[in-house]
Image: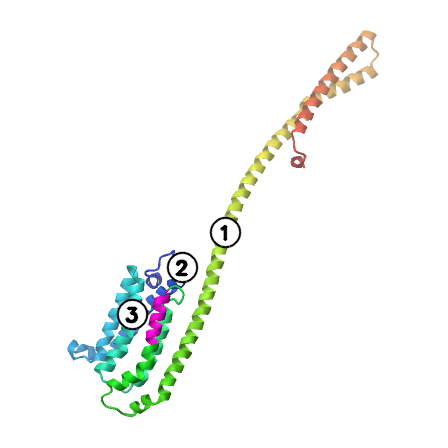
Amino acid sequence: MNWIANLTHLGVPPTLTGDIRWRIVFSNVVFICLPVVYLIFMGLDYKSYMRPFYELNFDQTVVPIIIAVCFLGLWLNKVGFTTISRIIFIISWPVLLHILPIKLLHTPGDYYLVFPLGIIFHALLTQLMFSYRDEKLFFFLFMGANFLLMLASPSILIYYDTSPHTSYAISAGIFYLYDIILYWLLFGLLTFYILVVMEKNITEMTNSKSLIEQQKEELNTFNQQLEKLVHERTRALEEQNEKLKSYAYYNAHLLRGPFCRIQGLVQLENIMPTSESEKEEIRKKLNDSITELDKRIKEIQLIVETIDPKDVD
């Protein structure tokens, strides 16, 4: 199904946003769907199309012409001429499907209904294919031409009607024109309101998407900063662990040695009768051990003073 999505987005750059983007997408949908419908129509009436082309009546001839116009629109959108493709289609629609049949076929009876309905549908297509905000010139030009064509439709039908019948009486009545205007306004305003609401929702969705993307970028930046902070914190903890290991080494080895000697000398002095010279020797060794112990304590104090208490906790 990706190829269908690609077809509907012909001529739509990824950077293009706003109303025009959706008008181009809609035109691609029309250029795809209309040939499908007409090809089905040709398939149902295939016996007529088995005859030579010059023997076909106008209603049968116009079908492949409309298909060709749609394919031309797709190609123009593909090469970037999206505005031209929509202009050609909007002009071709009433000319091929309404004006020429009325003139060449001398106003068939069903065109007293088909022509006004076609004008109303043409107005809806105009609103869907051109943005009233970003393409004001084309929007109001074609809507104005459509409205004038709608007002002139009874006169056009009567002018080319070479065999007046009941439809002439219907079109000649003032209420016939009033009904056309009524339905033109009804469907036109309803379509316009729906488009305004849809475009408002699309704008809000686009803004929300932009906000989400911005928040994602901010979150990524925050995560990068957090990773950097965690890395720095981990490195600081590793340094503190090394200091704590040094502290443990002093406590287990260098500090314990002089402490045990002091303890042993004190016990030796208390339990053994000694001469004055031996006592002097013991005191000297005690002083040496106490000095060594004091030195180790100061070294430990220096280590501890370089450790952040928060890190130790």
- Residue 138 vertical position relative to residue 48 in the rendered view, above or below: above
Q: Earlier in the sequence, mark 3 or mark 1?
A: 3
- Residue located 51% across and 46% down the image: 221
Q: CA distance from mark 2 to mark 3?
A: 23 Å
Q: CA distance from mark 1 to mark 2?
A: 21 Å
Kind of residue at badge 2: Thr
Q: Say which quadrant the N terminus sits in.
A: bottom left
Is label 1 in a helix, a strand or a loop? helix
Q: Exactly how many numbered labels are in the figure?
A: 3
- Residue located 33% across and 69% down the image: 30
**Scheme of colours in the image:** rainbow
Q: Are marks 3 and 1 in contact (CB under 8 Å)?
A: no
Q: Nearer the viewer, residue 255 or 144?
A: 144
Using the rendered image of the protein, determine whether residue 217 is visible from the camera's viewpoint. Answer: yes
Q: Which residue is mark 3?
A: 89
State which quadrant residue 182 falls in. Answer: bottom left
Mark 2 crowdedness (10 Å alpha carbons): few <14, some 14-19, many ≥20: few
Q: Which residue is mark 2?
A: 17
Q: Which residue is mark 1?
A: 216
Is label 2 in a helix, a strand or a loop? loop
Kind of residue at badge 3: Phe
Q: Is residue 271 left or right of residue 6?
A: right
State which quadrant residue 9 falls in. Answer: bottom left
